[in-house]
């Protein structure tokens, strides 16, 4: 609504100072032309708002002007109480401050808004970590957070996954991120702040010293935008290959988030099995893919690359042999049949008919649709 947009422009200029029409348009998610019309409406209403031309120009309010249009709507009051997450605030050492702020906010609200805010707090609870995540102690988090607030260089002893595992680093902290219940520090090397910032798990900090050396993020650094780019880069480096698969309807529902996204983006109906889906899934490594795909049992079949299909077949055969019943008579020529080895049979090579050069049809009466043997499966490292 236009009235709400006008109030937002006033509050933005009051809190941020000078802003260009383009900046206001991005904040309001409207066109620049709409911002021009809104500014004209504010000026016509007597708001002391001025526009400066030029490269460093923009709109600003007359010095000292303050609007009193700061009342909260019911949904805004509910959102404020919902955003007060007690767990992370307590980890940062701000638990008592958050409680005090909520108490003051609640006391300042009119009775009807107070009741709605209390109902939001009573009926919604956020538990960010996953079901099987352990509550890992983060003893250095308050001190790391303090260094981030005050802009101080950190000297840390850090444990990483590769050798040498324990290293010492001097870091310029740029920000903290809470992801799936874990805290991450975004920081650049203190010796060379021109290098791109890296990500450190705060629970892997073994020792910490906060120095008196001041630091600040580079101009224009956006923590949220950097985190999005870092996640995309991580996925790119993590998934080094691809696998073509067919999935049953139940198999699609059992996929992890990344594989499910790949199926949603590029999955097509399988031409050989009614109701099944054919898709290309990202692969971290052959060994990891074997563990993930065997967990889906007969709800998935890997069609390529051939090397991955062979690795799964060998693994499934070894598992079936390990759990096969013991032979009753070691002198017998024909061993007793083992337990059901459906997965091993699915990946077993098709038998050739000596009377014909054509391969035998598959279990569903159609020729086997395997990937050509010459297909390159790289980069499955």
Image (cartoon, rainbow, N blue to C red):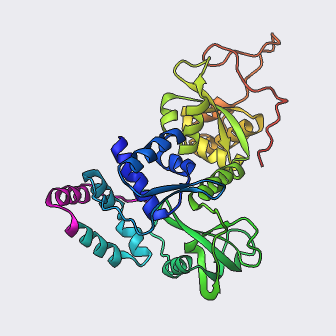
Magenta residues, start to end: 107-129
| Residue 174 visible (yes or no) | yes
Q: Is residue 112 magenta?
A: yes
Compared with 333, 202 (above or below) is below
Q: Position of residue 116 (x, y in %)?
A: 20, 55
Give the x, y percent position of residue 10.
Answer: 40, 56
In percent of width and height, residue 39 lies at 45, 47
Q: 152 or 208, which lies in front?
A: 152
The image shows residue 130, relative to residue 278, as above or below, that is below
Q: Is residue 154 left or right of residue 65?
A: right
Specify the quadrant of the image occupied by residue 167: bottom right
Q: Nearer the viewer, residue 28 or 19?
A: 19
Which residue is pictured at 33% across the width and 78% down the height? 96
Residue sitting nearer the eye, 287 or 333? 287
Residue 61, by quadrant, is bottom left
Question: Overall secondary structure of the magenta stretch?
Answer: helix
Q: As displayed, is residue 323 above or below residue 340? A: below
| Residue farthest along the right direction in this orientation | 374
Seen from this angle, which residue lies furthest left? 111
User: Could you tell me residue 300's position as x and y percent?
Assistant: 58, 33
| 155 sits left or right of 374 in the view | left
Q: Is residue 340 visible?
A: no
Residue at screen point 24% across, 55% down: 123
Q: Is 29 left or right of 116, judged from the image as shown?
A: right
**Front one among 292 and 349:** 292
Quadrant housing the N terminus? top left
Number of marks in the rendered image: 0
Residue most toward the top? 355
Is 143 included in the stretch rendered in magenta?
A: no
């Amino acid at each position: 609504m236009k009235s709400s947009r006008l109030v937002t422009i006033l509050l933005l200029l009051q809190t941020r100072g000078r802003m260009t029409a383009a900046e206001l348009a991005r904040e309001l998610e409207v066109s620049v032309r709409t911002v021009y019309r809104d500014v004209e409406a504010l000026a016509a209403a007597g708001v002391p708002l001025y526009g400066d031309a030029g490269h460093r120009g923009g709109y600003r309010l007359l010095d000292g002007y303050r609007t009193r249009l700061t009342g909260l709507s019911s949904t805004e009051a509910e959102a404020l109480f919902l955003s007060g997450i007690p767990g992370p605030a307590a980890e940062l050492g701000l638990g008592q401050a958050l409680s005090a702020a909520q108490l003051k906010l609640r006391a300042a609200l009119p009775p009807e808004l107070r009741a709605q805010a209390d109902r939001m707090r009573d009926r919604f609870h956020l538990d960010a970590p996953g079901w099987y995540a352990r509550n890992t102690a983060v003893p250095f988090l308050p001190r790391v957070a303090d260094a981030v607030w005050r802009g101080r260089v950190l000297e840390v002893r850090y444990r990483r996954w590769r050798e040498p595992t324990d290293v010492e680093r001097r870091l310029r902290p740029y920000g903290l991120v809470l992801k799936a219940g874990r805290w991450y520090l975004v920081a650049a090397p203190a010796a060379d702040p021109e290098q791109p910032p890296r990500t450190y798990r705060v629970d892997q900090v073994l020792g910490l010293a906060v120095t008196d050396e001041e630091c600040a993020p580079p101009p224009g650094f956006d923590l949220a935008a950097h985190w999005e780019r870092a996640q995309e880069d991580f996925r790119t480096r993590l998934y080094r290959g691809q696998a073509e698969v067919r999935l049953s309807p139940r198999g699609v529902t059992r996929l992890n988030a990344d594989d499910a996204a790949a199926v949603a983006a590029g999955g097509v109906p399988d031409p050989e099995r009614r109701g099944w889906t054919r898709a290309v899934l990202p692969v971290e490594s052959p060994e990891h893919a074997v563990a993930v795909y065997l967990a889906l049992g007969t709800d998935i079949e890997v069609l390529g690359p051939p090397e991955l299909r062979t690795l799964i077949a060998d693994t499934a055969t070894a598992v079936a042999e390990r759990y096969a019943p013991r032979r009753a008579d070691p002198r017998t020529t024909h061993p007793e049949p083992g337990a059901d080895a459906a997965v091993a049979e699915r990946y077993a090579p098709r038998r050739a008919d000596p009377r014909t050069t054509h391969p035998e049809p598959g279990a569903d009466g159609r020729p086997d649709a395997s990937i050509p043997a010459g297909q390159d499966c790289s980069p499955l490292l």
